[in-house]
Amino acid sequence: MADPYIDPFETKIYGKFAREQMAAVLRGKLPPLDGMVEFAIGKQLVADQAMSDVLDRQPKPAPELDSGAVLEEARDVIVRFASYLDSLKGRPVDPKVFFRGETPSVLARRRITKLTAAVGHIADELERQREKVRGAEMWLAELREVHEKLGIVERQQRATRVERVELGPEVSTAREAWLAVYNANKSL
């Protein structure tokens, strides 16, 4: 009996190893049975290919964002936005409104959850103060984009560390068929 813990992705490794071992260990031991060994190797190859085809048709997981790059981008946006606010003639808006009384450089060093909330607050506040800040549309777009990326990174970090594709019944059926061939060949 094959190991029950062989997952669908490991079938590629185990199947190839089984074929190699049958060829190396069994072929030539009893020449009249070499045809049977070749038959078993061929059946394993067909089962391996069928399993591989099923796995290739499965949906691929979404690519992950680089959390370090996203955090750096968010921190950069906060600091640049603060500098921009300071550069506006006559200071039409108090920067404390955006940064909740904290200095932007300190706010930018917060952990991802607080950083995400801070960027969201800055964007929401800028939306309310839109008429007073020249170039608000450009800043809003940049803040919303980085806020969205931070949300994705935050969800990625909460998700399980081992990325697994949701496998449907087709994969389960193909795995059972593969295990039947593998079990038979393992008995040789």
Image: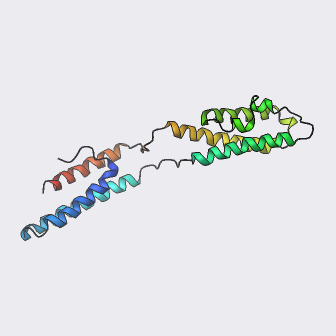
* Residue at the (70%, 40%) spot, across then down: 144
Q: Residue at (37%, 52%) from the top-left corner?
A: 55
Nearer to me, 4 or 79: 79
Taking the image as shown, residue 137 lies to the left or right of residue 113, namely right
Would you say residue 40 is visible in this rendering?
yes
Quadrant in the rendering for residue 134: top right
Figure label count: 0
Task: Name which residue lies at 15% across and 64% down.
Answer: 25
Q: Is residue 145 left or right of residue 128?
A: left
Q: How is the image coloured?
A: rainbow
In which quadrant of the rendered view does residue 139 lie? top right
Residue 137 in the image: x percent, y percent?
A: 80, 42
Q: Is residue 145 visible?
A: no
Q: What residue is drawn where x is 70% and y is 35%?
A: 107
Q: Position of residue 140 (x, y in %)?
A: 76, 41
- The quadrant the C terminus occupies is bottom left
Q: Is residue 160 left or right of residue 99?
A: left
Q: Is residue 89 left or right of residue 85?
A: right
| Residue 45 location (% of width, % of height) | 26, 61
Above or below 101: residue 155: below
Where residue 165 appears, x then y in whole percent? 42, 45
Q: In the picture, residue 98 is in which quadrant? A: top right
